[in-house]
Image (spheres, helix red, strand yellow):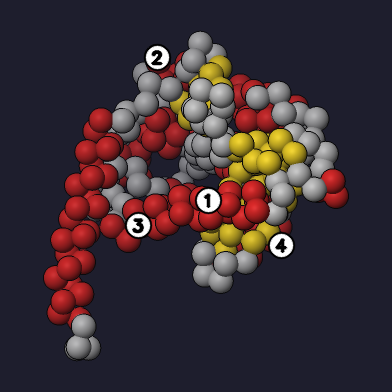
Amino acid sequence: MGVSDIISQQINKHIDESILNKHEKFERSNKRPYLGASIIGRPCARQIQYMWKSVGVDQGKGFPPKILRTFKIGDVFEELLIDYFWNAGFQIQTKNSKGQQFGFKYYSDQIRGHVDGIIKDGPKDCGPYPRLWECKSMNDKKFFEFENQGVKRSHPVYYYQMQIYMDQLKLTTNPGILTAMNKDNSRIVHEAVPYNETEAKKILNRAIEIINKTERKLPMPRISKYRDHFECRYCSWQNRCWSHE
């Protein structure tokens, strides 16, 4: 054992317990009455139902402390990038005149979302403005896929999230900007994502279908007919899903 192993285990045990306790309290007290735009583009519609309604995951499938720490690190990267943008001459607004995060409500407030920011102005060679701005942090593998394939192919959930935001916030004239930072080496890549009305309406209609079927207590179809499908193998609700029709 290394000289720091024992004290590391002792301290981290308490840290991890506090992280799990805080996460569990948050999950119990923050069940959303609406379907969030950040999950509507997920490939399996039934999984979206489980996530939206905070259905308990299969035993042993909850997020471990390491993953929860990684999620929080993403917030730090976002704050850092906002600072970088402002220092570089971009007027990026993250809150409205009331001090609230920019967002929207749709379909009797049952579909909602909050955007990372809106680039109101900036260097002329990066315009025109305004532009929707979304920020994501990625590990090296996911970053490589994004950089080489583009967001629609590498991260369709993010792509459809941006389509919904641009549609609902009327930011349809200029392409939105998706900024990604590599968590392993701090590289930054930006992609201009044009608004596509067909794609936006398609994903919003999917959300409406999910809401209507969920209200009638009807499950959406699984993504596959086979339990060993890639998405099913790594799903936190695999056992629950396949034990019901």
- Calculate the distance from the C-alpha at mark 4 to the C-alpha at mark 3: 27 Å
Identify the residue under disc 3: 69
Identify the residue under disc 2: 216
Element under label 2?
loop
Q: Please report whichever mark, 4 or 1, sits nearer to the chain's N-terminal start.
A: 1
- Calculate the distance from the C-alpha at mark 1 to the C-alpha at mark 2: 38 Å
Q: Position of residue 43 (x, y in %)?
A: 54, 41
Q: Please report whichever mark, 4 or 2, sits nearer to the chain's N-terminal start.
A: 4
Residue 148: numbered disc: 4
Quadrant of the image containing the C terminus: top left
Find out whether the residues at labels 3 and 1 contact each other: C-beta distance under 8 Å.
no
Q: Identify residue type, mark 4.
A: Asn
Residue 28: numbered disc: none
Q: Identify residue type, mark 3.
A: Arg
Element under label 1?
helix
Identify the residue under disc 1: 78
**Circle 2: is it few (<14), some (14-19), or many (20+) Cα within 10 Å?**
few
Q: Position of residue 182 (x, y in %)?
A: 57, 64
Which dot, 3 or 1, sits closer to the camera? 1
Q: Residue at x 38, y 21 (%)?
A: 33
151 to the left or right of 28: right
